[in-house]
Amino acid sequence: MVSALITVAAIAWLSQLALGGWQIRQFNKAFDTLCQRGRVGVGRSGGRFKPRVVLAVAFDQQDRVTDTLLMRGLTVFARPTKIDHLIGIKREELEPDVIFPHDPSCQNALSLALKMKH
């Protein structure tokens, strides 16, 4: 019985490592693509028991959004996605509480991403 529990725990741990590595590779690939689109600001929010949010925004020379990356979730199955409706908006027009009216974690992450140096 004890050896079965140890085996299950070891398999779960190895699965977590493998899936976590896969998630990091997916994020890094998406982030590298984003960095090629302009200057990038990154914001992160969340806690231990609520979904974490990582939001990155790329800006061109005119301070318009050229691309975005949003990753949120509690598990290793969270995947990076885009926020298409932000593309083309000027930096000073981005209002986190208007863009994400019901999501304080995304609001906080966007606020942090917008604080990048000009």
Image (spheres, rainbow, N blue to C red):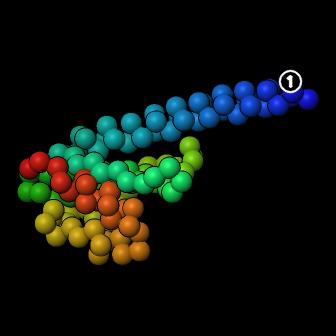
Label 1: which secondary element = helix
As displayed, is residue 70 above or below residue 16? below
Q: How many marks?
A: 1
Which quarter of the figure is the N terminus placed in?
top right
Within 10 angstroms of label 1, few (less than 14), some, or many (20 or more) residues? few
Quarter of the figure with residue 101? bottom left
Q: Is residue 95 shown left or right of residue 15? A: left
As displayed, is residue 97 above or below residue 78? below
Type of the residue with mark 1: Ser
Q: Is residue 82 shown left or right of residue 15? A: left
List x then y, in percent, for residue 51.
50, 56
Q: As rendered, which of 57 and 107 lies closer to the eye?
A: 107
Q: Is residue 88 shown left or right of residue 99? A: left
Whether residue 112 appears in this view of the structure is yes
Quarter of the figure with residue 5? top right
The residue under the point 20% across, 63% down is: 88
Q: Is residue 10 shown left or right of residue 76? A: right
Whether residue 67 appears in this view of the structure is no
**Residue positioned most to the right:** 1
List x then y, in percent, for residue 108.
32, 61
List x then y, in percent, for residue 67.
27, 53
The residue under the point 38% across, 67% down is: 104
Q: As rendered, which of 87 and 47 lies closer to the eye?
A: 47
Q: As rendered, which of 60 and 16 lies closer to the eye?
A: 16
List x then y, in percent, for residue 47.
45, 52
The residue under the point 28% across, 68% down is: 96
Q: Which residue is mark 1?
A: 3
